[in-house]
Image (cartoon, rainbow, N blue to C red):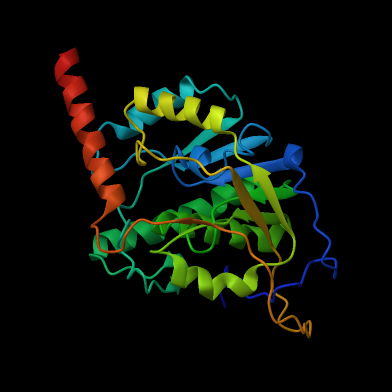
Amino acid sequence: MTADPFRTVCPGDTPNGNCEPSPMRLKDAILVVAHPDDEVLWFSSVVSTVSKVIIVFSGNPRVPGLGGSREALLAAYPLDTAELLGLTESCSFDAADWPNARRSEHGLELKAPLTIRNAYRRNYDRLVPLLDHALADSRVVLTHSPWGDYGHEEHVQVYAAVAATQIKHGFEIWYPGYVSDRSWPLMQESVLGFSHNYETMNTNRDLAHDLAALYRSHDCWTWYDDYIWPVQETFFLDSGRVATTGSTAFGGNFPVNVLRLGLHQGRPRLRMLSRILKRLGKRERTVS
C-alpha cells in the first residue's frame, strides 16, 4: 500500500504534545519550491536565510526558451544557495477541477489529456528519489502548502513528494499560509492539518523586489507585475498523522494571506506564460 502523503491533524496537536511554538531553525532548513520565482513570491522572509534552495522545474514545453532563460538567471542569482533540479513542467496548471480539486497519490486528480496526466505522474515518480537523496540529512524542510498556495497543481505535487520523503527521513515540514479564492476549498480540507506551531515573519520586500527585477530582466517572471507583497507571512508546521491521539481540540487560530485571483477570469498563469513567450520571441528577433 502506498503511503498517503497528505496529513489529517487536529488543531492543537503538535509533535511534542504541547502548543508551544517551535522555531523553524532556518539555518538548518532546506527550501523546496516548484518553479523559479516561487521562492520570491511565497518565501521572501526566509529565502536568504535557509541553507539551500531547491527549485524543481526549469523548462515548459509551451514556452520554448524558458528553461534556458531560467538557467541563465540562476547563474546570475545573488544567493549562492539556489540549485535547479531541471525537471520539465507537465503543463498541468489549471488541469484540476478548481475550486473542487481532489487529491491523488501524485498531487491532484487532473481533468486533462492523457499526455498531461502521464507527464504529471512521471514528474512525481522522478522527483521523489531526487528529494530522497537531497533531503536525506535534513532536519527542517520548507515547501508549498497541501493546497498549492494560490492553487497550482505542481505546487501540490511538490508538497506531496516532500511529504512522501519525510515519511522515510523524519524531518519537519513547514509550509506558507497563502491561499486564494481558487484554492480555498482545498485549504479547508487541510485545515485540520494545521497545528498551533506556526511562525509569522516579516516579508523581505526589498529582496523580493530585487529578485523580481532580476527575473523580469531574464524574461521569466511568471506572476503579476503589479503584485504587492504582504507585510507578513505565516508558516505552519505539518504535524503528521495523529488519528489516534484522542485530541479534544475543536479549533484554532490560523493566520493566512488571502489572494483574490477571480475564479472566472480565465487562466492567470497561462496568460503570464503566453506573455513570456512573446517576450522571448521578441528578444530572439532582436538578437538575430
Residue 182, position in %: x, y? 38, 64
Q: Determine whether, in the image, residue 143 is placed left or right of residue 183.
A: right
Q: The N terminus is located in which quarter?
A: bottom right
Above or below for 68 versus 169 = above
Q: Residue at position x 37%, y 41% from top?
A: 223
Q: Is residue 205 at all visible to an observer of this figure? A: yes
Residue 4, position in %: x, y? 57, 73
Q: Residue at position x 35%, y 36% from top?
A: 225
Q: Which of 81/176 is in front?
A: 176
Q: Residue at position x 58%, y 51% from top?
A: 143
Farthest residue toward the top?
Answer: 287
Above or below for 108 versus 217 = below
Q: Residue at position x 56%, y 71% from top?
A: 190
Residue 127, position in %: x, y? 50, 51
Q: The C terminus is located in which quarter?
A: top left
Q: Which of 259/110 is in front?
A: 259
